[in-house]
Amino acid sequence: MSMMSKVRRRIPGRTSQAHRKVTVPEMLAGAVVLFLVAAVAFPAALAPFDPLAINPADGFQGPSLEHWFGTDESGRDIYSRVIFGARPSLLIGAVATAIGIGLALVLGSLAGLGGKALDFGVGRLLEVLFALPGLLLALVFIAIAGPGVVTSTVAVGLSTAPGYARIIRGQIIQVRGSGMVEAAVVLGRTRWQIVRRHLLPNALSPVFVIATLGLGQAVVWASSLSFLGLGEPPPAAEWGAMLAAGRTYLTTAWWMTFFPGLFIVFTAAASTVLGRGLQRRMVR
Amino acid sequence: MTRSSGTSGRLAAAARWFLSKFLGAVFVLWAVTTLIFFGIRMIPGDPAEAILGGPGSQASAAALAQVRADYGLDQPLVAQYFGQLARLVQGDLGNSYSLRLPVASLLGEQLPATLTLAVLSLILAWVVALGLATWSTLAGRGASIVSSGLEIVGAAVPHFWLASVLILLFSINLGWLPPVNTGSAEGLILPVVTLALPLAGFLGQVMRESMLNATTSPFALSARARSETEGGVLFRHSLRHAAIPGIALSGWAFGSLISGAVVVETIFARPGLGRTLLSAVTLRDIPLVTGVALVSALAYVLVMALSDVAERVADPRVRAS
């Protein structure tokens, strides 16, 4: 792969300086990612309060110098809960993305490498899964498997899989017809060697991009499911569950809804901006 | 494709296209039914018990037997499966476990509300997206920053949060619009905006790119050479080019609208398929879940077929190939 990228870089006009320069949104997205990584790794260092400590006397306080994002109905500090919420929320998103890409790799490879009959079969399966777009497939899966954190994570992974599978299949087929595979066949390489040396590495590089783009989407979908009461139950400091709890008090305590949602937006926006940036640098 | 000339050739091609779409739809509906039917039977648990309210309900043996007989659960699996398919062909979707009513009539009641919401949101999203694309083509930098900002919003803002923020702003702070469904047209504004904004951001992005390409393309140059005004180039040529990727993304738009409808109908307490699906999922009312899944799968297939046709109408290059 490194050989390929070197060759690609030498082609004039393909990768201009403008494409490699880091833009302002990308810098902001990078800062968001750094903050989130810190929140995931050392939440106690960033959060001033215990995310689960109940203190009813301090309930429903608006944002102040002491409680930056206010407090909830039990007097818990929202800012601390948002910081501690980064770990479960991002973990669910990351696991869901991994499940989606794992499934897609299996389906995409079967379709791209397994011959005509398998390609046809996988194609039909994807067609059916595409007919239940977005949250629909996730909701149908939860109806069958029952609600909960584990099933909602799997459900989000499952509903992202068809899109990834189509991309991976297309990529494999494109590489399969390329000159380097033809050359490898002429050189007498075995089928397995070609798959391992050429097809998989080249088909996997865009997976990195779609995983970055997909992580934000997965966090949004997973939090939607817990907002709808199908994921993590409310006392947990998971962002979607915090929003679900805040919904009841929207008229009186807007901060309970606003701030956890803001972090979901920041996460998804950062993942979109960075994913687009990677895409721009790799594809062109 | 064979190059057949004349009306009969075109008719035959249209018939073939229609038949393939129809068979595709039948296949998708069969597969969705089959996946849910066998999926639910792979999960441990007694369906009869689920119908009576789950394992906690302590249903008596007689009641369980009665439910098994009522819902045909005492028959062999194969008989149940083919029975369900046979009823499906006749348009019978079975009875809801939780509401004890025919699923087909329940869905018929809920469909218009969701359809109204989705169609209005789609129209608003297209108007905003085309407007943004035109504006940024004409006005340049400032407009592109606004458009790309909205694009990130479209990709990153969850429907449930956008809805909450809109309610906070327009219902609670300003008091302009009702925070929940009142049955009036006013009550539709916030739900429609909630669904339309993220969609508009996404569509606007692709439309903007396509439109910019069109304004600098050879055919735009030759139109200008024919002393066509910039406005003429924009409306006769570029706008069509902006619409093409928007049409191609119809399947995606459908997904965004239908998953958004689940959230929006719940938050604004509106009737509709989305809220019905959520309560069916929560209560694990499998016939109702299957019904909603089938209706939306059918709608998806229809949307895709229509977008095929629309793409042919809008894009002469597709017709030529």
Image (cartoon, coloured by chain):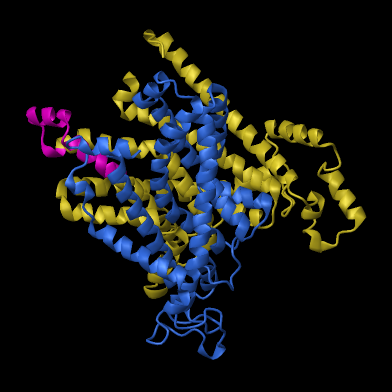
Q: Residue at x 73, y 31 (%)?
A: B86
**B59, above or below B88, in the image:** below
B162 in magenta: no
Residue A12 place in picture, x, y as percent: 17, 36
Q: Which residues are magenta?
A: B206-231
Residue A261 sits above or below residue B251 on the image? below
Residue positioned 59% across, 61% down in the render: A231
Q: Residue at x 43, y 71 (%)?
A: A39
Chain B is which colour? yellow
Say which residue appears at 59% left-offset and 56% top-offset.
A152
A28 or B233, nearer to the observer: A28
Q: Is residue B66 left or right of residue B158?
A: right
Give chain A's shade: blue
Q: Quadrant of the N terminus of chain A?
A: top left
Closer-to-camera residue (A246/A180): A180
Relative to A111, residue B121 above or below: below
Would you say B156 lies left or right of A234 here?
left
